[in-house]
Image (cartoon, rainbow, N blue to C red):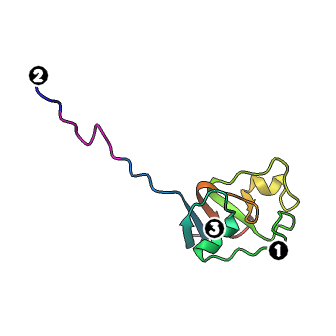
Amino acid sequence: MPAHSVTTEETPEKHALPPVVRFLQGAKLLGQTPHVPGNTLVEHAEDAGVHIPTNCTSGTCGTCMVTLLYGEIPLPEVLPPGLDDYLVEGCARLGCIGKPDGDVDVDIRPPL
């Protein structure tokens, strides 16, 4: 019986790229940085050379509100004072407490 040759179709190479956090303003890419588990959006933004304004750093004031365009940024069980259900429905997240899970695209502007 002849030896079976393996083709690339049978064993596709998986080159999974490391997750990236991207910061946009509308369609303009402002910067991106590799995802670091446990870091907040503000910390990722600093690594990418992007400024997200902060004030309280505890989720109270909403100064750091951004819009999640793609990916997952889990919400706390109890929404902090800086967020409400209406804002969350518009994909609002707080940069000071939001910790992305993997690939994430964020508009640095809050939802309208």
| Dominant secondary structure, magenta | loop
Q: Residue at x 73, y 65 (%)?
A: 95
Q: Residue 111 is drawn in which quadrant?
A: bottom right
Residue indicated by mark 2: 1
Q: Find residue 80 and report its horizontal and vertical position in percent.
A: 85, 57
Q: Secondary structure at mark 2?
A: loop
Residues shaded magenta: 5-13
State left or right for residue 20 relative to residue 81. Answer: left
Q: Residue at x 79, y 51 (%)?
A: 76
State left or right for residue 92 relative to residue 6. Answer: right
Quadrant where the image shows the N terminus: top left
Quadrant where the image shows the C terminus: bottom right
Residue indicated by mark 3: 44
Of residues 104 and 1, the one nearer the viewer is 1
- Residue 10: in magenta span: yes
- Whether tag 1 and tag 3 are in contact, CB under 8 A, the answer is no
Which of pointers 1 and 3 lies earlier in the amino acid sequence? 3
Of residues 23 and 19, the one nearer the viewer is 19
The disc labelled 3 sits on which kind of residue?
Answer: His
Which of pointers 1 and 2 lies earlier in the amino acid sequence? 2
The disc labelled 1 sits on which kind of residue?
Answer: Asn
> Spatial distance from mark 1 to mark 2, Cα to Cα?
73 Å
The disc labelled 2 sits on which kind of residue?
Answer: Met
Q: Residue 67 is drawn in which quadrant?
A: bottom right
Q: Find residue 5 and report its horizontal and vertical position in percent.
A: 18, 35
- Whether tag 3 and tag 2 are in contact, CB under 8 A, the answer is no
